[in-house]
Image (cartoon, rainbow, N blue to C red):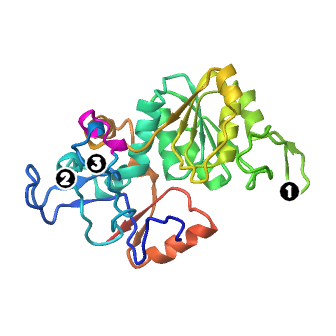
């Protein structure tokens, strides 16, 4: 939509992909035409200090398909620095499932398991049940957590319950007005039709006993404030959703309750085997997240329709 200054039109988006290698560049070893692969959406350089330490997800020289070069909403897409970015797919994994691993599922896996370090028995509140949030619901539930899913869309919450959420909370469609970035007390929510008082998201989470871990899978200043207000003492907040406009944190609460704020950005290729093993054993089933398949020709209209709302689940494009 032109909000990212780094994108110059015409442009091909798409940062989650899976397919078969059609050509191999000079200097690439270990990979061959016909190999079935996927890749993280962060294509790291493999040579900088962060890459040498295994932190390719924060490589300062990273390239991202669909963002700073043409992406995967096409018949072909390039994968740079193939040696550190390609992931070999199991023979029995279909491309539709594998494509969703590049960002939303792998990002959620690392955020929940490796960054948030969610443990069995903990209560995890996940704000936003799009592709990333629903993936986080499935992963946290598989780890034995008590998952609370929060979204404005009742259809998304239905899917969240199917994927393992123990509780769901329907958030109001529009937050109360507030000064930009300013922390607010949790608002009281009244049904627009004049119905009875409905407890706020924060109040409902507190009634459950508060959250050990909160996850913002959408990216919203309002969600950040609700997340911090919902945490139990010494709780952990994991920020996945981007916050282009920034956010003003309630640092006093962070200090007094000894809360932890954690950022999580993708997952490097070398960390995929643990996730793929859990998929192969049936402990995780990302195939269930796919709710719609469309063609390349249908993609422009589907992208434009996102301005009116996001359909529940994951949409796969088949070239």
Instruction: Name the residue tied to disc 3.
Output: 44
Per the model, the C-alpha gap separating discs 1 and 2 is 53 Å
| Label whose residue precedes the other's in the sequence (1 or 2) | 2
Residue visible at 22% across and 44% down? 46
Please tell me whether residue 266 belongs to the stretch shown in magenta.
no
| Label whose residue precedes the other's in the sequence (3 or 1) | 3
Q: Is residue 172 above or below residue 141?
A: below
Counting from the top left corner in percent of width and height, residue 44 is at: 28, 48
Instruction: Name the residue tied to disc 2.
Output: 82
Counting from the top left corner in percent of width and height, residue 279 is at: 33, 40
Q: In this picture, which residue range is highlighted in magenta? A: 51-59
Q: Residues within 10 Å of mark 3 (few under 14, many from 20)?
A: many
Counting from the top left corner in percent of width and height, residue 282 is at: 35, 38
Q: For this view, does 122 lie left or right of residue 69?
A: right
Q: For this view, does 120 lie left or right of residue 158?
A: left
Res. 3 image quadrant? bottom right
**Residue sitting nearer the eye, 282 or 146:** 146
Please tell me whether residue 57 belongs to the stretch shown in magenta.
yes
Q: Is residue 111 above or below residue 156?
A: above
Secondary structure state at the residue bearing disc 1: loop
> Which numbered marker is on residue 93?
none
| Label whose residue precedes the other's in the sequence (2 or 3) | 3
Residue visible at 34% across and 56% down? 99
Res. 94 image quadrant? bottom left
Q: Looking at the rendering, in which quadrant would you find the C terminus?
A: bottom left
Q: Which of the two marks, 1 or 2, is nearer to us in this view?
A: 2
Q: Is residue 4 above or below residue 87?
A: below
């Amino acid at each position: 939509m032109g909000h990212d200054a780094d994108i110059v039109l015409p442009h091909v988006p798409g940062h989650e992909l899976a397919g078969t290698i059609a050509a191999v560049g000079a200097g690439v070893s270990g990979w061959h035409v016909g190999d079935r692969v996927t890749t993280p959406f962060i294509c790291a350089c493999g040579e900088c200090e962060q890459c040498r330490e295994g932190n390719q997800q924060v490589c300062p020289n990273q390239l991202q398909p669909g963002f700073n070069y043409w992406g995967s909403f096409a018949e072909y897409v390039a994968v740079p620095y193939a040696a550190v970015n390609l992931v070999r797919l199991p023979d029995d994994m279909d491309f539709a499932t594998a494509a969703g691993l590049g960002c939303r599922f792998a990002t959620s896996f690392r955020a929940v398991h490796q960054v948030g370090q969610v443990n069995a028995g903990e209560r995890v509140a996940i704000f936003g049940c799009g592709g990333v949030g629903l993936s986080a619901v499935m992963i946290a539930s598989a780890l034995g957590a008590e998952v609370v899913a929060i979204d404005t869309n009742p259809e998304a919450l239905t899917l969240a319950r199917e994927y393992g959420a123990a509780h769901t909370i329907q958030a109001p469609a529009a937050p109360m007005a507030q000064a930009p970035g300013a922390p607010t007390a949790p608002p009281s929510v009244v049904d627009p039709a004049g119905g009875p008082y409905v407890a706020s998201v924060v109040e409902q989470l507190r009634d459950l006993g508060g959250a050990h871990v909160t996850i913002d899978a959408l990216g919203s200043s309002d969600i950040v404030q609700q997340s911090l207000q919902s945490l139990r003492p010494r709780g952990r907040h994991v920020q996945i959703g981007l916050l282009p406009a920034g956010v003003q944190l309630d640092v006093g609460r962070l200090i007094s309750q000894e809360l932890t704020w954690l950022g999580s950005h993708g997952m490097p290729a070398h960390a995929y085997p643990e996730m793929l093993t859990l998929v192969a054993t049936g402990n995780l089933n990302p195939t269930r997240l796919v709710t719609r398949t469309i063609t390349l020709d249908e993609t422009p209209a589907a992208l434009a329709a996102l301005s009116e709302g996001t359909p529940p689940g994951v949409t796969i494009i088949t070239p």
